[in-house]
Image (cartoon, grey):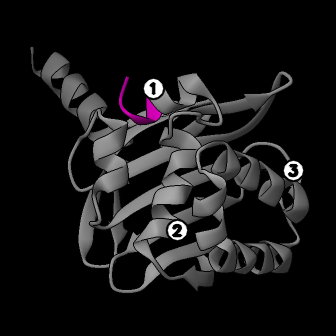
Amino acid sequence: MNKILLLVCGVLLSWDACALEVAGVKLPDTAQVGSANLQLNGAGIRTKFFFKIYVGALYLPQKQTLAEAVIADEREHRVALYIKHELSSGKLFNAFNEAIEANHTPAELAALNTQIKQMVQIFDSVKEVKPGDVITLDYLPAAGTVISVNGTARGTIAGAAFNRALLKIWLGNKPAQDDLKKEMLGG
């Protein structure tokens, strides 16, 4: 009996604290953004033409299954992209921009023009991302969206409207991928 108890204790102590593994990426169950301790809401794989592009993970102050509520919430949150396929800055920006355009009217896009130009500059400074790289999009209400690659901040884009536009890439009415939206919302 003691041997079984020791074995069970050993297994429990060695158990990885990751909440989820997607496409070989072990996702932490929490993330620290500013002073907020966020929890993993959900995650899934972005594919295109049978290629695994990235694992997208959404971290929120509390679990949420409604996209509209996540987009409207102006508290700290994180979208983390765990890169699975090499992408140039141009391809990365084009993918983001296409999804932003699909979810906004021409007038809304015109209002976001300055922030989108800032995003182009940030992506151009990155040049490319490779498998194993991690892009984080952290929203801090007082500062804006901090775009980081492998833990190094590359730039901050002010404004809640821009952050909502980014969230719509994955959670909007016309998301980059329907099943990724569902998975990021915990489905």
Specify the amino acid type for callout 2.
Phe
Name the spot of residue 50 as percent of width and height, x first: 83, 21
Query: Which of the image's four quarters has the N terminus?
Result: top left
Against 10, is 81 above or below? below
Q: Residue at x 46, y 59 (%)?
A: 164
Residue 97 left/right relative to 183: right
Mark positioned earlier in the residue sequence (3 or 2): 3
Q: Which mark is residue 67?
A: none
Callout 3: SS: loop
Classed neighbour count for the residue bearing mark 1: other residues with Cα under 10 Å, few (<14), some (14–19), many (≥20): some
Query: 132 or 60: which is nearer to us?
Result: 60
Q: Secondary structure at mark 1?
A: helix
Q: Taken as a whole, is the magenta stretch helix, strand or loop?
A: loop
The residue positioned 31% from the left and 54% from the top of the image is 72
Query: Is there any visible trace of residue 130 in the rendered image?
Result: no
Q: Residue furthest front?
A: 107
Residue type marked 1: Lys
Q: Which of the 4 image quarters holds residue 115?
A: bottom right
Depicted 71 relative to depicted 102: above or below: below
Residue occupied by mark 1: 182
Measured as percent of width and height from the top left, residue 6 is found at: 18, 28
Residues rendered magenta in the picture: 183-187
Query: According to the image, label 3 marks what residue?
Result: 86
Q: Distance from label 3 to label 2 (Cα)?
A: 26 Å
Q: Is residue 159 left or right of residue 39?
A: right
Q: Which residue is mark 2?
A: 162
Which of 159/77 is in front?
A: 159
Place of residue 51 in the rendered image (x, y in percent of width and height, measured from the top left): 83, 29
